[in-house]
Amino acid sequence: MAQASAQHILISTEDVANSVKAQLKDGADFSVLAKHHSECRSGARGGDLGTFGPGQMVPAFDKVVWSAPIGEVQGPVKTHFGYHLILVNNRT
């Protein structure tokens, strides 16, 4: 069965998500920014979502995880939770 591991930063507004993404493009550490900005409990773990299979995340998030290049920050991706910056770490 296919598995992926990813991190994300959940932010309530697109403007703030774009600002955080700009910091990532400038070399900021994803885990550090997740701890400071994410509104998800995973933020305390640097945004680490662990390992999961296809269909375990909401559709818009799931689509990115299973199609995005590994190691490249994606987003902001809008879901009913807010705006996600997603970093796919591994996919099998």
Image (cartoon, rainbow, N blue to C red):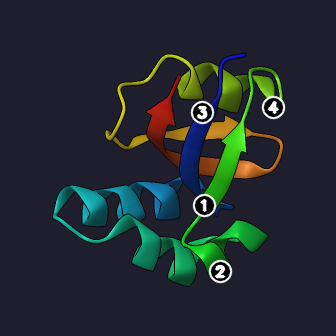
Residue 4 at x, y = what percent? 60, 33
The N terminus sits in image quarter:
top right
Disc number for residue 48: 1
Disc number for residue 4: 3
Q: Residue at x 55, y 53 (%)?
A: 7
SS category of the residue bearing label 3: strand
Q: CA distance from mark 1 to mark 2?
A: 9 Å
Above or below residue 76? Residue 63 is above
Is 82 left or right of 24, judged from the image as shown? right
First-in-chain label (3 vs 4): 3
* Location of residue 77 (image quadrant): top right
Q: Residue at x 37, y 63 (%)?
A: 19
Identify which amino acid the numbered label 4 is placed on: Val
SS category of the residue bearing label 2: helix
SS category of the residue bearing label 1: strand
Above or below residue 56? Residue 44 is below
* Residue 62 in view, yes or no: yes
> Between 23 and 91, which is closer to the camera in this rendering?
91
Is 76 left or right of 11, judged from the image as shown? left
Q: Residues within 10 Å of mark 4 (few under 14, many from 20)?
A: few
Q: Marks 4 and 2: which is nearer the front?
A: 2
Q: Residues within 10 Å of mark 2 (few under 14, many from 20)?
A: some
Identify which amino acid the numbered label 1 is placed on: Asp
Disc number for residue 58: 4
Q: Residue at x 31, y 71 (%)?
A: 29
